[in-house]
Structures are given as C-alpha cells and as structure tokens.
Amino acid sequence: MSNTTSNSRSTGSLTDVGPGRWTLDAAGTSVRIQHKTFWGLVNVKGVFTKVSGEGEVLAGGGAHGSITIDAASLDTKNAKRDKHLRSADLFDVDKHPSIVFTATGVTPAGNGTAQVTGELTVLGVSQALSFTAEASEVAADAVTLTAEVPVDRKEFGMTWNQANMLKPLTFVTIAARFTRQSA
C-alpha cells in the first residue's frame, strides 16, 4: 500500500512523549473517507462517527495500539447510499461490524512525523499497511497523529462495481487523538 502524509504542522516533538497507556479520544478523533465514483466525476465523502482505541508508548518512544471503527457508523449524508455501503455488496456490516487497524509499530521519525506500520482488517481480510503520520498535537497528556492513506478496496474483497463506476482507491484521512490514562 502507498504511503501518504498529511499537511498538518507539529506542535511538539514525539520523542518527548513519555511511556504509558493511552486511550483514543473519540470526540477528538475523525476518520473520513473519500472515493471517486461515476467514472471519476463525483467525489463521495463520508465520516465514520463511532471509533475507539488504545495504545501504549514504550520507553524509548516507540508505540503500538489499535483503532476500531464501527463500520455501520459511516455517514455520507445520503441515506440510500449509506444503506448500500453497509450491505453485503460492500462493508457487509451484519457479518463484519468492525474495521480494525492494529499498529504494531509507531516510531518517531523526526520533523514531527512518525512511521506507522501495522495491519488493517476489513471484511475479515487483513493486509499490511504502513504510512507516515504527522503530529498535529503533542502535549504531556495528549497526542494527535494525522495521515491520509490510500487503500485499495479490492485487496479486502470489496469488488462490487456496477458499470465500472468505482475507482479502486479510497482515501482514508484520520486524525487520531490519544490521551494519557491516569495512573
């Protein structure tokens, strides 16, 4: 999968983040998708409204964790389209209610960025995924990492494509805000 970095500015150094357990701040996190359809003429945008997650920063600055997305929470502002996206043609939320990204490694890479490696699971299919994220917030008790990641839906078995209307790549833009757990 391709690597893409967002254009946010860092407010601190990721190497200064201390070790400990962290929880995803759902209210401060957004997971958005953008997908070209109608032969590239229309850009469908949506947001997943229910996300959760956790992570751990290790001594030395590395981290790992996971983000779970409620697949049925996708909102594109079009009820008919959303119903179809939730159907067995695409996300099949009755059989696969969650989309999960498990970060096996988050390593500060300098200039307010982190190299993220892990595994994305959609429709029960897991694929390796790596990308560069930027720290748009770094504080003693909060860190926000942002990234735009292209994902090929066909790699997860999402092959529905009436009249060849859908492009293969979906762009996922995530701003994941984590807060330090109290001791």
Image (spheres, rainbow, N blue to C red):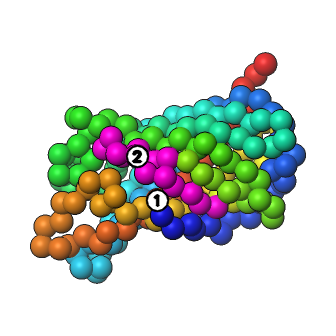
* Frontmost residue, 179 versus 27: 179
Q: Residue at x 60, y 47 (%)?
A: 176
Return the mark for residue 172.
1
Q: Position of residue 3 (x, y in %)?
A: 56, 66
Magenta span dominant secondary structure: strand
Of callouts 2 and 1, which one flags the residue occurring earlier in the amino acid sequence? 2
Per the image, the residue denoted by label 2 is 126
Tag 2 and tag 1, C-beta contact below 8 Å = no
Alpha carbons under labels 2 and 1: distance apart: 16 Å
On whether residue 20 falls in the magenta region, the answer is: no
**In the image, what residue type sits under mark 1?**
Val
In the displayed structure image, the side of residue 74 where residue 2 appears, left or right: right
* Residue 72 in sight: no
Magenta segment: 119-132
As helix, strand or loop, the secondary structure at mark 1 comes to strand
Q: Position of residue 43 (x, y in %)?
A: 34, 72
Q: Quadrant of residue 143?
A: top right
The 10 Å Cα crowd at callout 2, few under 14, some 14 to 19, many 20 or more, is some
In the picture, the quarter occupied by the C terminus is top right
